[in-house]
Image (cartoon, rainbow, N blue to C red):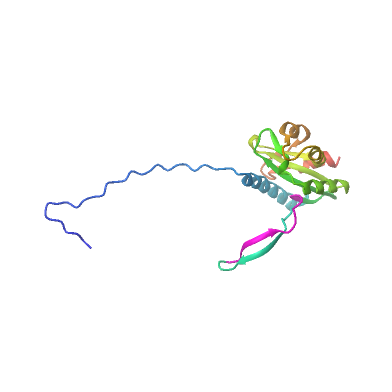
Amino acid sequence: MTIKYPAGVKAPTAPLKAKKPVKAKKHILSAANRGMVLENELNDSCLYYREKGMALIYKRPTPINIVKVDYSHGATITQAYFETQSTTDYNGVYKGKYLDFEAKSTKSKTSLPLNNIAPQQVDHLEEVIRQGGIAFFIISIDLLHEVYLIDAKYICEFYRSKPRASASIPVSEIKEKGHLIKEGYHPRLDFLPLVDELYLQ
């Protein structure tokens, strides 16, 4: 509907609204995101090793039991639960030896809390060692941009000797007992040379 105004009277105009400045979005690095960065880098490295025929190492899938699926927009899992407690993140074969390892990240510059490590992971890695396999942890100290390979035996012994609710592994000990992993493009985290040095000499 058009409104007609008398001659000489101008139609009112709405005042221009000042545009609000757009705030830059801050990228928040959550614990889950930190873990995913390390996982993605390790997945890429293991894929590189497999494609080059150097080692057969895979990310171990987490066993889940699906309860409900929504098929209205494709198959989407809406309800599920973990069937069993997961053990470690990665396992495989390298130069005829079974290897098994867990990947952990910490946002602290000073420590890795022991409550980041599950009891069943320690039990599993101790059994791998008893069976003659290669077992280790890969630990990312995110704020220092450093990733270390450290023997599982050391971590398991430390874990057994401390009250988990309050204890942490100092970063100084991770640096002393562990070995800095060389970072590059392909593979992103080249940890096999350390496996050679530490376990296959």
Tell me where residue 116 sits by quadrant: top right
User: Start and end of the magenta stretch?
Assistant: 74-90
Q: Is residue 88 magenta?
A: yes
Residue sitting at x 16%, y 59%: 4
Q: Position of residue 3 (x, y in %)?
A: 19, 59
Left or right of residue 78: residue 99? right
Q: Position of residue 151 (x, y in %)?
A: 80, 40
Q: Quadrant of the N terminus?
A: bottom left
Q: Is residue 34 magenta?
A: no
Q: Quadrant of the C terminus?
A: top right
Q: Position of residue 91 (x, y in %)?
A: 78, 51
Left or right of residue 36: residue 94? right
Judged from this view, the residue extending furthest toward the left is 7
Q: Position of residue 177 (x, y in %)?
A: 78, 34
Judged from this view, the residue extending furthest toward the bottom is 72
Residue sitting at x 79%, y 48%: 100
Please state the total of marks drawn on the protein image.
0
Residue sitting at x 60%, y 44%: 30
Judged from this view, the residue extending furthest toward the right is 131
Q: Nearer the viewer, residue 141 or 31?
A: 31
Q: Nearer the viewer, residue 94 or 76?
A: 76
